Amino acid sequence: MTHIKRKQFDDHNEKQYLSVGIQLAAPVYATMSRVPLLTEKTIKAKIARYNRRKIQDDSLTRSAVLVPIVESLDGLELLFTKRTQSVEHHKGQISFPGGAADPSDKSLIETALRESSEEIGLTASEISVLGVMDDLQTPSGFVVTPVIGFLHHRPAIHLNADEVAEVIFIPLEKFFDDSLRRSEVRERRGVPVEVYFYDVWKEPVWGATALFVKRLVDLLRAK
């Protein structure tokens, strides 16, 4: 039984991705035993059974991110963005596409899809929404809702150059390798907080983004 299916990748397509600000992290071949059998159906079923934690606080700004799981020729990947230095929050950091809710948004799912379209050109029609996971309060005064999405191919990318410097595809299985995860205890407003880091690219995935990934991986590992 295979776990995350791999296919041969077209070098021509890879060159096209690299030409528009997209980075492809190298796949991992030594950690397959750590990765459960994952398909769109099994991931959706696990999220459906999950009792997510909600934060209700009107003093915080509601926002949402899309956590895109991409079925590529190399297997399942997570799509990240690297922020520019000109954005208001999280300058230069690796993140998921997303942002603050707009009054016209009918739901936080719609917020995540709209922001993903505005930032990197994803269309709602190519995203299957699998569910929603735990809210997270950030030090900057946001409560962020992660929306898990599934794409059946690497999408065409159209960067909003004011907000996104590049798009990064990282094999999902890398995040199942515990040797690539570390944490530090930092103090926020006098309270010790564990901050996670994943050393899966030339720069670490860390902070709120890493916590979203850890929660997703923990869920996908659960039986």
Image: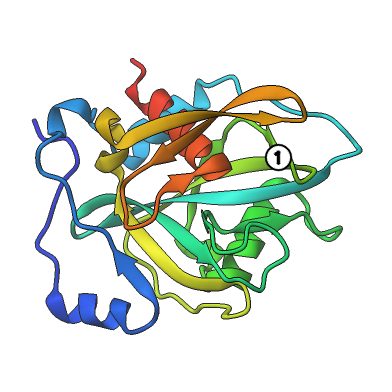
- The answer to whether 84 appears left or right of 35 in the picture is right
Q: Position of residue 148 (x, y in %)?
A: 51, 43
The residue under label 1 is which amino acid type? Thr
Q: Observer-nearest residue: 215 or 82?
A: 82
Name the residue: 43% across, 67% down. 167
- The answer to whether 65 appears left or right of 183 in the picture is right
Q: Quadrant of the N terminus?
A: top left
Name the residue: 61% across, 63% down. 91
Q: Quadrant of the C terminus?
A: top left
Label 1 Cα neighbours within 10 Å, binned few <14 / some 14-19 / many ≥20 = few
Q: Position of residue 220 (x, y in %)?
A: 37, 27
SS class, disc 1: loop
In this rendering, the count of numbered labels is 1
Name the residue: 45% across, 57% down. 80
Q: Position of residue 64 (x, y in %)?
A: 67, 48
Q: Which residue is mark 1?
A: 138
Q: Position of residue 46 (x, y in %)?
A: 43, 26
